[in-house]
Image (tube, rainbow, N blue to C red):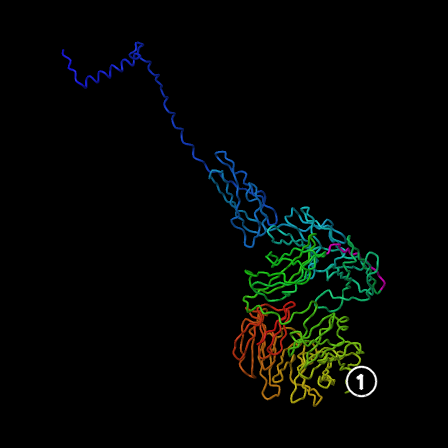
Amino acid sequence: MTLIRTPRLVATLASLAALGLAGCGGGDGEGPPAEPPVVVQPPPPAPPPPPAANRAPTALATAAGEARVGRRLALDGRASSDPDGDALSHRWTLLSAPAGSRAPLDAADSALASLVPDVAGAYEFQLAVGDGRAGEGRTTLRLQAAAPDFVVRTDAPEPLAGDATLSLNGPVEGRVQWFLRRNGEREWLGTGAADGAATLRWNAARVARTVFGPDVEARIELPGGRLLPVSRRIDLAEPPSGAIRLAATLSRADDAVVVDLVASSSAVEVVARLDGAELARLARPNHCAGVPCAAFDTWRFSVPDARIGAAGAVLRLALRDAVDREATLDVQLPAVRPPRLVIGSPVDGQFVFGSLPVRGQAVAADGTPVRLRWFIDDEPVAGPAAPSGLAAEPLGTLALDGVTAGRHRVTVEAEDAAGALSRVDLTLFVAASAAEAVPPSLVLPAGVGLAGWRGGRVLLLDRAAGARLQNLDGSGAVTLAGTPGLLATDPAWAGGALVGDGLLAGASLPDCPVASCLYQWGPDGRATNLSLRDTTTPRPPWAAAGLGGLAAVGDRFAVTLQPYDGGLVLVDTATGRLRFIERPAVPEANVLTRVALRVADGVPELLFSLAPSLTREPTLFRWRADSGTASVFSPGWQPVTDGRRLAWTRAPLAIASWNPGTLVTAPADGSQPAVEYPLHEIGNYVLADGVLAWQALGRERSLPGPVQVSVAHGDTPQAIDGSILLHVAGGWVYLTTGRAAIEAYDPATRTLRIVARERPDQWLVDGGVVLLRYGRAVLRVAD
């Protein structure tokens, strides 16, 4: 075989030869080189399986015990679990609560949370648990909080006669303030101990036993600020037969403790000794316990703070009565001096709206600042803080946003660092608009009463400074002579009638030789004893018994009652002369009813009635000053007049309430015959300034009929349904209606206007101007 060598073949063979030589160690005779080791790589591991999915925890919420207002409610989330064994976090949320609740949720980020319900009703909670890996479980818990079950307890059996410990059936959450409530007033007794039962030691021996109390009140300050009052009537022991019972009340005035003593027997002397040293000696009472004040019935002593030591003091009150019986009472005066708290503005009874500026003074006894707390109807609200200075200054503003229009009780409390407490209660009227928040025209000082209103002048009674006449803005004030001493000895004196620029009233001043004389005070405040000035008779019939109250008053003339025989006395205020009017000779007539006074052509004329007995119809008599005699006018009683018309009633029974009968009216000059309006039940009727208004009870007796209004003799009366007749003056008929406390009806236009939405404590009318007193605030409302 022939081998054909081509260039390509030659190159291939050369390459193979070279490879063979290299495998034998090359071409140097040592053989081919060694082959490299073969490394075998293991196969890669299989990928791990995917992790199991995270499972959400399960939330489980429970509550320990019963949900009840004032008791701490424990919320437990410890039974919550996680299927993967992860540690859990807890978060509680209060989803809903009863209206008005302010209860905070405590320890909301722990397994064990708690809350003190402050309003009865449903509370709904949510518990959320987390495992830290975005897993979360939730659940809700709804609980119904029952009404509080706290009761006031005493450690001594009732009736109490001495010291006793007051407490609550604990455990109590929050601080407790104890009060004694009597006659609408609160006396702070102290702060309960922090022992779970809020115990307080109390001396019941110094408390007066009354038919309606007293009440002991524990006021629990719940978390969140709501107040929970718990009260109980305490039964006090009767004094031993023949013994005198003494009772004392503590209060504060300026920098002193005021002690008011009342006794079950009339005393002729009370001696007060402070830690053995005589403090004061009184021969008669010097203060009134009630309002209105009929007579001084309280022995008042004032103990300056400077005389009370750091450990307190004991005031011993020793009483001796007219038969030389004696009784003593030891009163512990506390060393704690509550902060001085004075609210100058707003005043009690004021109408307010929106943000209310507050002025006053609040400072601790040692001059340090205090903490102020504000409440509206016992609900805590945000209010001004205490000032740093000692003088009266603006305290800030009280926000009234959201407070419904109407009457509200506003309470401010001042508390010092030691826990001593002072409080001021105000009645404020939140107006529906800024226009209705009328500022008072007059602010009565504390202890001053409003007694009269005429011609822009007001009569004020101040038991400390006497009676005074002044303009509504406070200018032109004149103190009436003799009245400071009069009010100090006769607290029941309530003034008389404003006539002209002065006052006409019965009183017993030092120059009065009998029980009561008639005085006229002029615009300068000087007093004239008209009883002594009269010279019409050598010995007036009232010389032995004095004059009684005013029966009728006009612009110039007035009529007073002569108490010893029921006669009348005509008073001419222009001349100061008195004229005795002998009573007509009516057999067995012993009842004198209302007197109507008018002046016709300058001649005074009286209309009055006499009743022979309580079961026979009275007779009306007319007396004229020009003739000096009285004549029979008509059967009837209770006459009224405005000078132009007369009105009276006829009934089968005389002095009996709600008699069926007839209202009769006639012109005073007799120019037209009388007109009668039958009434099923005689109620109220008023005649003034040309307007006669009356109202009868309905046939059910409990429901009054419509108010009837007549503006001319014989006209068809106008009827006003759904109202109660109050008064007639200045051509207006004043009513109480369903929408307002006082409305004025205009017979000419037959329209009503609101005078007062809220019922005033007192109201006076002069013509078309009305004065409304709310607390210390006096408002002027014009037609």
Q: Is residue 458 magenta?
A: no
Q: Name the side, left or right, on which 286 lies relative to 84.
A: right
Residue at the extreme right = 324
Q: Nearer the viewer, residue 685 or 517?
A: 517
Please state the total of marks drawn on the protein image. 1
Image height of 705 relative to 666, above or below: above
Q: Position of residue 42 (x, y in %)?
A: 37, 21
Q: Nearer the viewer, residue 439 or 234?
A: 439
Residue 1 picture location, percent across and down: 14, 11
**Residue 662 in sight here:** no
Quadrant housing the C terminus: bottom right
x, y percent for residue 223: 61, 50
For label 1, the crowd category at 10 Å Cα-Cα, with few meaning under 14, some 14 to 19 and many 20 or more, is few
Range of residues picked out in magenta = 323-337
Q: Is residue 548 above or below residue 109?
A: below
Residue to which mark 1 is pinned? 539
Of 749 and 592, which appears nearest the observer? Answer: 749
Three-letter residue code for mark 1: Arg
Residue 695: which quarter of the image? bottom right
Say which quarter of the image contains residue 629.
bottom right
Q: Is residue 743 above or below residue 634?
A: above
Give the percent coordinates (x, y) of residue 583: 73, 83
- The residue sitting at 52% across, 46% down in the picture is 93
Nearest the eye: 208 or 613: 208
Q: Secondary structure at mark 1?
A: loop
Indicate left or right for 574 with 739 as reference.
right
Residue 324 on the magenta span:
yes
